[in-house]
Image (cartoon, rainbow, N blue to C red):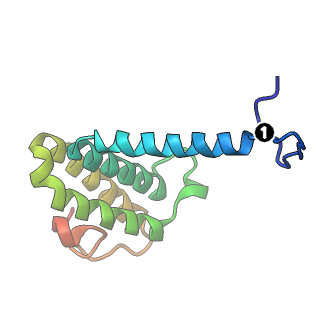
């Protein structure tokens, strides 16, 4: 039984209502997703977002499986700046326990960025250091 719709729907003169059913299913899924996010605590949203930024920054500074093809320091700088801002602004809201481990991860990618840079930024001028202070 083929459950994947064909890319070109066939014309059914008897009145095929599958497109209407699919649209209704998509609408129901979107409504369910909206209700689900409403149930997620803010601390979890903040920490999950920070972990995603941290993971992406780690890949972009070359701390992944294939650093030769995945390193992109321009992208890493943007991610680290966003992460530093989120951690700094969110720290009072997410408790010291969560913020401490995120700060440690941030410091690790900041140091990895400095190490991967051909021409390192001056101390205090690297990515995220505007919010975290100098990282050495």
128 horizontally vs 100: left or right: right
Q: Looking at the image, how many numbered discs can be counted on the residues?
A: 1
In the orientation shown, which residue stands out farthest toward the front? 14
Relative to the observer, which residue lies in front, 81 or 13? 13
- Please rate how many residues cluster around mark 1, counting C-alpha atoms within 10 Å: few if below 14, some from 14 to 19, many from 20: few
81 horizontally vs 58: left or right: left
Q: In which quarter of the image is residue 116?
A: bottom left
In the orientation shown, which residue stands out farthest toward the top? 1
Instruction: Locate the C terminus by quadrant.
Output: bottom left
Q: Is mark 1 on a helix, strand or loop?
A: loop
**Residue 3, relative to residue 22: is it above or below?**
above
Instruction: Check disc 1 and report the residue beneath it.
Output: 5
Residue under the point 17% across and 64% down = 132
110 horizontally vs 57: left or right: left
Residue under the point 82% across and 47% down = 7
Residue under the point 86% across and 49% down = 8
Relative to the observer, which residue lies in front, 51 or 20? 20
Residue under the point 36% across and 72% down = 120
Task: Give the image location of residue 72, x and y in percent.
Answer: 51, 65
Task: Give the image location of residue 88, x and y in percent.
Answer: 17, 60
Task: Give the image location of residue 89, x and y in percent.
Answer: 17, 61
Task: Give the image location of residue 87, x and y in percent.
Answer: 21, 56
Instruction: Locate the N terminus by quadrant.
Output: top right
Q: In which quarter of the image is residue 95?
A: top left
């Amino acid at each position: 039984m083929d459950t994947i719709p064909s890319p070109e729907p066939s014309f059914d003169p008897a009145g095929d209502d599958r497109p209407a059913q699919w649209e209704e299913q998509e609408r129901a899924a979107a409504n369910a997703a909206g209700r689900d996010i409403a149930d997620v605590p803010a601390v979890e949203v903040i920490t999950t977002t920070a972990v995603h930024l941290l993971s992406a920054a780690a890949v972009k500074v070359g701390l992944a499986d294939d650093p030769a093809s995945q390193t992109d320091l321009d992208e890493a700088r943007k991610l680290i700046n966003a992460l530093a801002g989120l951690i700094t602004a969110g720290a009072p809201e997410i408790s010291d326990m969560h913020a401490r481990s995120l700060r440690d991860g941030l410091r690790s990618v900041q140091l990895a960025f400095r190490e991967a840079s051909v021409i390192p930024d001056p101390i205090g001028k690297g990515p995220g250091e505007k919010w975290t202070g100098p990282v050495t």
